[in-house]
Image: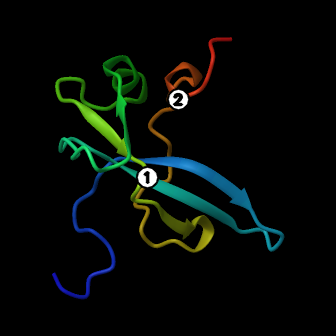
Amino acid sequence: MAGDTEGRKTRPVCIAVTVAKSDSETVVFILPITTQPPSASRKFIEVPQIESQRVGLETHVRKWVMLDEINTDILERSYVWEDRTPIGTFSSSSHPGSSPA
């Protein structure tokens, strides 16, 4: 709807970066995870099926982390998060530019 600032659909997200500020607040940089295939002009990373399984997401559909749709929030003051419990963590080998340990 026009004027909305938050989506109405609960969807998984990737917390890309957290920054602890000097005032004891935590800024989170949030990237959406989608099942809609992105157009070639978008910036994204496809989530491998094994990573979907690792973090507790559905494994029967492809997923992408959208890199050009960054949102920020203050974790301690946020009213958007229904549940702040992480559902999982992507492995370091799934990150672009990372090398196996």
Residue 72 horizontal side relative to residue 51, left or right: right
Residue 97 percent location from the top left of the image? 58, 27
Mark 1 is on which residue type? Leu
Q: Secondary structure at mark 2?
A: loop
Q: Which mark is residue 31?
A: 1
- Density class for disc 2 (Cα within 10 Å; few <14, some 14-19, many ≥20) is few
Residue 55 horizontal side relative to residue 19, left or right: left
Q: Quadrant of the C terminus?
A: top right
Q: Is residue 57 above or below residue 51?
A: below
Query: Which residue occupies the foreground of this view, 63 or 43?
Result: 43
Residue 6 percent location from the top left of the image? 32, 73
Mark 2 = which residue? 96
Q: Is residue 74 above or below residue 3?
A: above
Query: Which residue occupies the foreground of this view, 59 or 82?
Result: 59
Residue extending furthest toward the bottom: 3
Q: Secondary structure at mark 1?
A: strand
Q: Which mark is residue 59?
A: none
Q: Is residue 74 above or below residue 48?
A: below
Query: Which residue occupies the foreground of this view, 20 or 45?
Result: 45
